[in-house]
Image: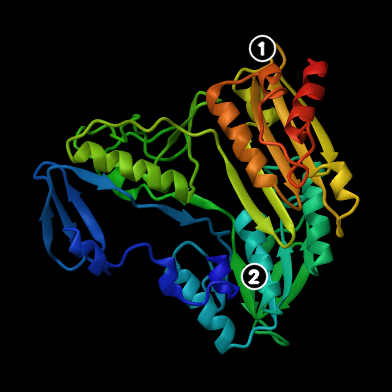
Amino acid sequence: MPYYIGDVIKDEKRMVARTAEQHKKRGVDVKLNTRVDEIDTDKGVVRLSDDTTMPYDYLVMGTGGNAFLPGIPGQDLEGVFTLKTLTDAIRMKTYIHEKRCRKAIILGAGFVALEMSEAMRTLGIDTLIVYRGALPARRWDSEFSEAILEEMNTNKVTFVPHTKPVAIERGRGFLLRLITGEGEMEADIILIALGVSPNIKLAEDIGLQIGETGAIQVDPSQRTSREEVYAVGDCCEAYHRVSKKWLHFPLGDVANKQGRVAGQNVGGSSMTFPGIVGSQSFKLFNLEIAATGLDEEEAAASGYDPVSNIIWGNPIAASLAASLPGLRKLGLKLVADKSTGKLLGAQAVGTENVVSRINALSVALWAGMDLDEIGYLDFAYAPPFSGAWDPIHTAAQILKRKL
C-alpha cells in the first residue's frame, strides 16, 4: 500500500488479487460491505449487519487485526489516518492530493512507518517520524538501525526520537498540530503506524481459546478450540519453528498460507501449516532491510545461550566492486546457540542482495543447520554476485570461532 500511495503503483485495481466477480466465477459468493455481528454456535448460524443470517457447517475466521491507536484526543480528526486496508490507502491518497499536503507526521518507526516515509518523500512531502524509542526499526540490531537512520537523513526524513504524542489538534500554518511531551509540531496529514493487535471480539464472544499473545489459539491445521471453527491470518497465532512457541506474526504471506491450509481442511483434505521462522523484509530508499529467526533477547527467552556477530563487507566480489561505480555495502548479523552451534537468527542491511541472503538463511533455519554447515554451503558463485566466499560463509565461520 505504501507503493500505491507513493504512486509507484498507479491503479488501485492492481492491489486487488481477485474481485467479487472473479470469485463468483469460481463458485465463491462474496458479500461486500457486510459485517458479521453475531455467531450462534448452537444453531450454526452467523447474523449479518444487513439483518440476514447464514448457516454454516464449518466457520473460518479471518477477522484480521486492528491498528494500534495511542488513545489521545484528536486521533479521529480528519487528516489522521491508519493504514490497514486498501480502503485506508485509497482514502489517504485521495486526501493527500485533494488537500495538496506539504508536510506529514508519522507516529511509529516500524517497517510500515519507514516505507510510508519513502512514499511521502517520493511525493515531495516534508516528512517527520515521531517515535518513543531511540532508533528506528527496533527489531534490528542498533548498529543496523543507525544505518537505517543515516539513510533517512540522506533522504531528508526527519527522525524525532524519545517523543510521546499527547494530543492532535487543528493547526494554524498547517491543517493539523501534534502535541507531544517535547513540544508541538504541525503537518497537513498524520499517519498512526504503531502496529496491529489481533481482532478477536467475535472469537471471544463464542468462547474460543485465546493464546498468551492475545491472538486466537489454533492447532497446525488452523482449527480453533471449537472443532468446526478455524482461524487464519492476523487474528490468530502461528508456530515459530526456532523458538518453539506460538506467536502473533501478522504478515500477509503467513495469512495466505494459513488460509490455504484451512481451506484444504474444510474442503475435505488433510493439511497442516508447518510454521514460520519469522522472516521479514522491507525497502527504504536505497537500502534493503531483512531479518529472520530470533535476536539475542528472544533466543535467551526461548532457552538458548545466544552468541552473535556482525560483519560488514561488499555484496559482490572485491575484484569487481573496485571497478563499479557507487557504494555497495552489506551488513550481516548471525545469532547462534553457544552449546550446539545451531543458527538461531539473522539480520541484514545493505544496498543490494540483502533479501536473497536472508532467504538463504531462512532455509538454513528451517532445516536446523549449524554454523559448520552454513560456513560451507554450496552457493552459485560468480564475481557480479559475490566472492568465492560469500558473506554468509564468512559470517558463519567468524561466529563459529566465538563459540
Mark 1 is surrounded, within 10 Å at the Cα level, by few (under 14), some (14 to 19) or many (20 or more) other residues, namely few
Work out whether residue 203 or residue 400 is closer to the camera in this orientation and state it.
Answer: 400
- Vertical relation: 277 (above or below) 155: above
Calculate the distance from the C-alpha at mark 1 to the C-alpha at mark 2: 43 Å
Where residue 262 sits in the image (x, y, percent)?
Answer: 28, 40
Query: Is residue 194 placed above or below 237 in the rendered structure?
Result: below
Give me the residue at 41% from left, 33% from top.
Answer: 211
Quadrant for residue 167, please give it.
Answer: bottom right
Whether 33 is drawn above or below 242: the answer is below
Q: Which residue is mark 2?
A: 119
Residue at image x 34%, y 33%? 218
- Residue at the disc numbered 1: 340
Residue 315 at x, y percent in the picture = 78, 44
x and y percentages locating residue 225 in the rendered image:
27, 31
Q: Are marks 1 and 2 in contact (CB under 8 Å)?
A: no
Q: Residue furthest right?
A: 322
Q: Nearer the viewer, residue 68 or 58?
A: 58
Drawn side of residue 262 relative to residue 70, left or right: left
Q: Secondary structure at mark 1?
A: loop
Residue 181, image x, y percentages: 75, 62
Query: Label 1 is placed on what type of residue?
Result: Thr
What is the three-letter code of the residue carrying label 2? Ala
